[in-house]
Amino acid sequence: MLRFLLVRIASAIPVLIILSIVTFAIIQAPPGDYADYIRSQLINQSGASFAAADAQAQAYRVAHGLDQPMVIQYFNWVKGIVTQGDFGYSMFYNKPVADVVAERLPRTLALALVCHIFASVLGIGFGIWAATRQYSWIDSLLSGVSFLGMTVPRFLMALIIVYLLVFQFNVSEIGSFFSPQFGGAPWSWAKFVDLVSHVWPVVAIATFGGLAYNMRVMRGNLLDTLNAQYVETARAKGLSGGAVVMRHAVPNALHPLVMYQGVVLPYMLTGEIETAIIFSLPTVGPAIVGSMAIGDVYVTATFMMVLSATLIVGNIIADMLLAMLDPRVRQYGGA
């Protein structure tokens, strides 16, 4: 198993390098940088002349290496990461990028993991329920829910909920994790309830898409498994219907869902990011959008690399789980 893990990690390193190059190139492709943002701010807010503002922008560009070719900037960024663990300096937040990531990434991962747990438990449970009641009204209802979850855009659901909360229910505290009275307070049950009251739309929307996929896959695979010969043999031996489903059919139908874990964390992260942008929560999503808009390249590149790394780590975890469940994977996968 250790060899299996090492092979997967070794194969992931070139992928991560290629992703870093492509990501940095795409971010740098649009014209303009943070110095241009400084120039526009000086002109619009400070009333400076174009010549004076442009001179300050050029000085800032030279001082921070923004005047160097993209290749040099990339290698300087990678060198800082490898040798010093330095992801660069955020020009907009005026602090190291590592501090920006440390502030926002744990919240994003926590929300994504909560969504993943809910989506897995509810999706698998509803999938089993629908498969064991095929063509009933329950199956039709759950299939309709699955269809909606996989087709309705998450940003549209977020916009609808924002409209309902703000214009129909007069909710004013949008865009924060806590009410003002709980911002710096120690953890308590009241603070936890206040947190849930602020983040439930994000959790609900991100969970809905993952739940729909889990339910659809579980239902389809379980229906195929229930028609397998070994399941018929188990029934012929006199086992109850529940024992046949839970002890023989469900474990074998879970294999595709185990592989799905390789993409579920990035999927939940993107779901959280989309909805967090609409709700303006201080997580990864608004930071990526804001940094891209003003040319804060190192923040954008670092967050995009973190999301890429979660995809790679998720696939490695999925490979390990599948290798533990299926000896054939260990045999042919080099474990």
Image (tube, rainbow, N blue to C red):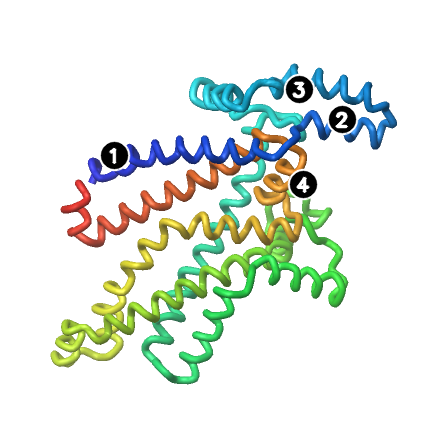
- Vertical order, 50 against 176 (above or below): above
- Where the C terminus falls, by quadrant? top left
Pinpoint residue 52: horizontal percent, then vertical percent. Answer: 82, 19
Mark 1 — residue?
6
Observer-nearest residue: 14 or 69? 69
Q: Type of residue at label 3? A: Arg
Q: Is residue 310 left or right of residue 239?
A: right
Which quadrant of the view contains residue 40? top right
Mark found first going from the N terminus, 4 or 2 = 2
At x 66% / y 19%, what residue is drawn? 61
Q: Which residue is mark 2?
A: 39
Q: Looking at the image, is mark 2 or mark 3 earlier in the sequence? A: 2
Task: Say above or below: 228 vs 159.
Answer: below
Closer to the chain start, of discs 4 and 1, is 1
Q: Residue at x 24, y 74 (%)?
A: 226
Q: Earlier in the sequence, mark 3 or mark 4?
A: 3
Residue 41 x/y as whole percent: 78, 30
The numbered mark, 1 or 3, whose residue comes first in the sequence reads 1
> What is the C-alpha distance between the residues marked 2 and 3?
11 Å
Q: Looking at the image, can residue 93 be seen?
A: no
Q: Local crowd at mark 1 within 10 Å, few (<14), some, or many (≥20)?
A: some
**What is the secondary structure assignment of the residue under circle 4?**
loop
Q: Are marks 2 and 3 in contact (CB under 8 Å)?
A: no
